[in-house]
Amino acid sequence: MKRGEPIIVSSVAASRQSPEHQAELIAAARAAVGWARARRATWTDVPLPVPTPIAQTQAAAPSPAYAPIPPPAPAPAPAPAKPVPTGPGALERAADFARNLSRPVLEWLPRVAVLAALGAGGYYGVRYGIDYFSKWQRARPAAQPEQSRTSVKPQPPAAAVKATGDLEVNSTPPGARVVVDGKMRGVTPLTVPDLKPGRHTVELAGEAGNIERTVTIASGQTATLDESIFSGFLALYSPFDVVVTEGNRTLRFDERNQVMMPSGRHELRIVNRTFGYDSVERVDLKPGETARITVKPQPTPVTVTASEPAEVWLDGARIGDAPVNAMPVDLGTHDIVVKRAAGGEKRFTVTVTVKPLTLNADFSR
């Protein structure tokens, strides 16, 4: 069933009623037209007032098919009803007029409702946007000066510090064995990683010699050790002849009392069997350099006594009157002369060793 048919039926039904009912129907149609025109001219989003039903002019009940259309409050009062024309075709023309008028009104009512909803949504959306922007502006912190914004720079995260350190070892010539804290690590050039912070003993051993060094390792850093490994020279100075050995090797000195040896630390044994001298010397021989060793044995105490008053002379120098007790004398061969005050002397040629020596000059024999 189409939406306009109830109006047509009501119009036909009204044509069968009395002239008063027909006049009411025509007046209602004119009021609807006036309301639509006035509403179109004064369209607003204000809710419509609740209409009141039109007062009945007759005591008789209206037709069941008739639904009065209340005019809106702001619409102007309808003009007084003009005399309804009568005649054979007047009723049919009125019915056609009402039918033709109701169709466009019913067709435009949904569109008008949609436009009204869109208008109301846009209005409240704009209001909401304005309110939200105002609140955001009030809550926004005050802008900082340009110098303050540019002076503060984000700092990059600090890198984690390595708990251990590394050691880079080089030697000239290369190929030296690297021993760190008594543990073999390889041959040069070499980088020894992950050493604990602190002091470490490093030994480089090559064909030309050995070198021992102490290095300090720091966390997260790389220490460097660069050494030249060449032979060195050992020079020996002694007041008497000695034999110098290293292990099972006897060193042979030239006319300058020098011998070429591998660089590094050496432990030498110096011996003179005649004087009973035997000592151990340690020397750190650097590459290309000359290390010097001087033999300085401790003097031996010598005591000289006499049976009569006498003077004591050592190697031609008077050292006192007898007795002379614990006089320090260097190791070696010496001449000791004891001269009696009444005349006469006694001469001794002695070999002073590491052991204490005692002489007695007896003039009674």
Image: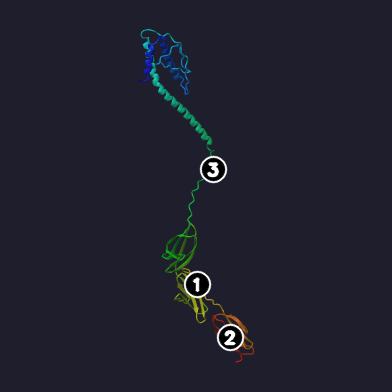
Structural distance between the alpha carbons of marks 2 and 1? 37 Å
Residue type at numbered disc 1: Arg
Q: Is residue 338 above or below residue 62?
A: below
- Residue marked by disc 1: 282
In this rendered view, identify the residue nearer to me: 239 or 300: 300
Q: Residue at x 53, y 41 (%)?
A: 146
Considering only order in the chain, which callout, 3 or 2, is on the residue closer to the N terminus?
3
Q: CA distance from mark 1 to mark 3?
A: 69 Å
The residue closer to the viewer here, 325 or 69, is 69
- Asked if residue 110 can be seen in this view, the reply is yes
Image quadrant in which the C terminus is located = bottom right
Q: Assess whether mark 3 and mark 2 are in contact (beta carbons under 8 angstroms).
A: no
- Tell me where residue 333 sits by quadrant: bottom right
At which x and y percent is residue 232? 46, 70
Relative placement, left or right, of 30 versus 293 is: left
Residue 272 drawn at (x, y percent):
50, 80
- State the image quarter where residue 114 is shown: top left
